[in-house]
């Protein structure tokens, strides 16, 4: 296999952190930049990304609005883990040789398919709600001293998947970005504690921290419509562009710019859909 696509894995072993919303917005942002994108949904039991894309595809005005689509495949788990891994590898190889970028959305749990998906990552994006409860998947914190005791189970899993890459003869280095989602506008004590703890963990575990997507009602309404923030540049009934939407689009731009994509173009054969 000669891998040409850049692989972005959106992962966190905790549910409810906005992985599928981040995945969808990354996909549309990359398509908007003229890149060919393949997307893989490994969280196919919940299938939020898959349903999001189906809502987009089903829009009667999709062609009129020019709503681009990726090539998308969901890989749901079955009772046969070996067969699951073979299906994922086949899908991955197909996309790696026909697209510029692959975006993989993973479940909020630890299983073989998720680990395999993580092992393909050139860039790992981990959305994290700005909460000490959610921080627990990355590091164990001593409540008495408010210091990190040691990395937690998800950080350890990422380390294991780096070793899996090395065993396949690939570079073990992964650009790991932790995305602080749903940041409060208030400079609360919790926010300052999170900043300090994440900075400590970043040094020890090896990730970068950037601001993520704010807590905005607009994301929930866009899911049912199959839309993203980028689509709101067009005049769409029921969605009037507000200052909040403009700020949210800037958050998204910051995320995409933070991903160190190589010079791409030519690996893919055009946009899906």
Image (cartoon, rainbow, N blue to C red):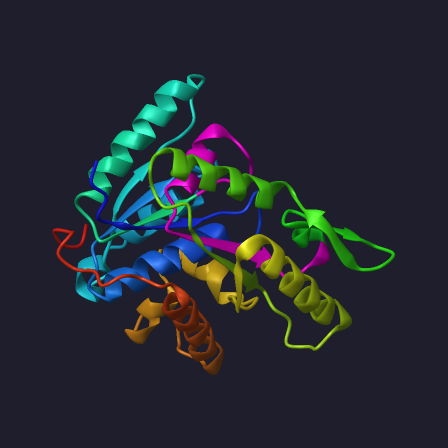
Q: How many marks?
A: 0
| Of 91 and 4, the residue lying toward us | 4
Question: In the displayed structure, would residue 158 be above or below residue 180?
Answer: above
In the rendered image, residue 93 lying in the magenta stretch gets the answer no
- Can residue 269 be seen in the rendering of this structure? yes
* Residue reaching furthest to the top: 80
- Residue 86 lies, in percent from the top left, at 32, 24
Using residue 200 as the reference point, say whether residue 68 is left or right of it: left
* Residue reaching furthest to the bottom: 243
| Of 231 and 164, the residue lying toward us | 164
Identified at 18% across, 43% down, the residue is 97
Using residue 113 as the reference point, say whether residue 196 is left or right of it: right
Identified at 20% across, 55% down, the residue is 36
- Residue 3 lies, in percent from the top left, at 23, 43
Identified at 36% across, 32% down, the residue is 75
- Residue 113 lies, in percent from the top left, at 43, 31
Using residue 73 as the reference point, say whether residue 250 is left or right of it: right
Question: In the displayed structure, would residue 167 be above or below residue 123?
Answer: above
Identified at 53% across, 58% down, the residue is 207
- Residue 64 lies, in percent from the top left, at 18, 64
Using residue 19 as the reference point, say whether residue 65 is left or right of it: left
In the rendered image, residue 109 lying in the magenta stretch gets the answer yes
Q: Quadrant of residue 63?
A: bottom left
Question: In the displayed structure, would residue 149 be above or below residue 41?
Answer: below
| Of 36 and 197, the residue lying toward us | 197
Q: Quadrant of the N terminus?
A: top left
- Can residue 14 be seen in the rendering of this structure? no
Which range is magenta? 106-132
């Amino acid at each position: 296999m000669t891998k040409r696509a850049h692989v972005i894995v959106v992962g966190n072993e905790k549910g409810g952190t906005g992985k599928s919303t981040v995945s969808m917005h990354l996909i549309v942002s990359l398509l908007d930049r003229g890149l060919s994108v393949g997307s893989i949904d490994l969280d196919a039991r919940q299938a939020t990304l898959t349903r999001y894309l189906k809502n987009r595809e089903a829009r009667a005005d999709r062609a009129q609005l020019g709503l681009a689509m990726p090539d998308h495949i969901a890989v749901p788990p079955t009772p046969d883990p070996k067969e699951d891994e073979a299906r994922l590898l086949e899908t991955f190889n197909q996309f790696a040789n026909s697209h510029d970028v692959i975006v993989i959305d993973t479940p909020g749990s630890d299983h073989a398919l998720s680990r395999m998906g993580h092992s393909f990552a050139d860039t790992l994006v981990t959305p994290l709600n700005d909460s000490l409860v959610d921080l627990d998947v990355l590091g164990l914190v001593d409540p008495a001293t408010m210091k990190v005791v040691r990395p937690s189970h998800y950080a350890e899993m990422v380390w294991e998947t780096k070793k899996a890459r090395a065993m396949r003869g690939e570079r073990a280095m992964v650009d790991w970005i932790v995305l602080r989602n749903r940041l409060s506008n208030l400079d609360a004590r919790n926010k300052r504690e999170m900043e300090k703890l994440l900075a400590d963990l970043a040094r020890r575990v090896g990730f970068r921290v950037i601001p993520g997507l704010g807590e905005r009602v607009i994301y929930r309404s866009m899911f049912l419509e199959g839309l993203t923030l980028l689509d709101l540049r067009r005049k769409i009934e029921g969605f009037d562009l507000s200052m909040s939407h403009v700020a949210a689009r800037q958050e998204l731009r910051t995320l995409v710019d933070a991903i160190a994509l190589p010079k791409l173009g030519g690996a893919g054969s055009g946009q899906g859909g």
